[in-house]
Image: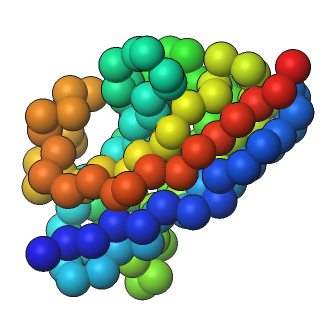
Amino acid sequence: QMQLVESGGGLVQAGGSLRLSCVASGCTFSAYYMGWFRQAPGKEREFVGGITRDISFTYYADSVKGRFTISRDNAKNAVYLQMNSLKPEDTAVYYCAASTYYSASASATSYDYWGQGTQVTVSS
């Protein structure tokens, strides 16, 4: 059973940066496509971006393209979300998720495992 643990969230001013980490255990991490999602209060969970297991491709939602970067280190069983130029509308709980698909969709139903989430709050 795969377990995912996110960290790195916090409070930051608009224009600032944060780097989220997600560490996996109990699995062959390099076999999974990894995605990041977020959920703001009163809103549905939305896709932020993802990275293929061989690190060949990354995908981003239009709302974060050019500001967020996803990377992974299969040797460390970790995936990262570097968030720059943060905006108040980026405030949400951020989740990492794992999928057995080579290139998972933006739909949360494509993912098999989820972390518990980490809060990101961007003040104006």
Q: Nearer the viewer, residue 58 or 50?
A: 50
Identify the image quadrant of the N terminus.
bottom left
Q: Quadrant of residue 114?
A: bottom left
What percent of the width, then of the height, locates residue 68? 62, 36
Residue 66 in the image: above or below residue 71: above
In the rendered structure, the answer to whether residue 15 lies left or right of residue 78 reads right
Q: Is residue 71 left or right of residue 102?
A: right
**Quarter holding residue 63:** top right
Seen at 19% across and 39% down, the residue is: 104
Please provide percent x and percent y for residue 49: 42, 36
* Colour scheme employed for the rendering of this structure: rainbow
Judged from this view, the residue extending furthest toward the front is 42
Q: Is residue 123 left or right of residue 40?
A: right
User: Is residue 58 in sight in this rendering?
Assistant: no
Residue name at image x 75 percent, y 22 percent: 87
Please provide percent x and percent y for residue 102.
16, 49
What residue appears at the point 65 percent right and 52 percent down from the top-left corner? 9
Q: In the figure, is residue 13 to the left or right of 35?
A: right
The answer to which of 13 and 63 lies nearer the viewer is 13
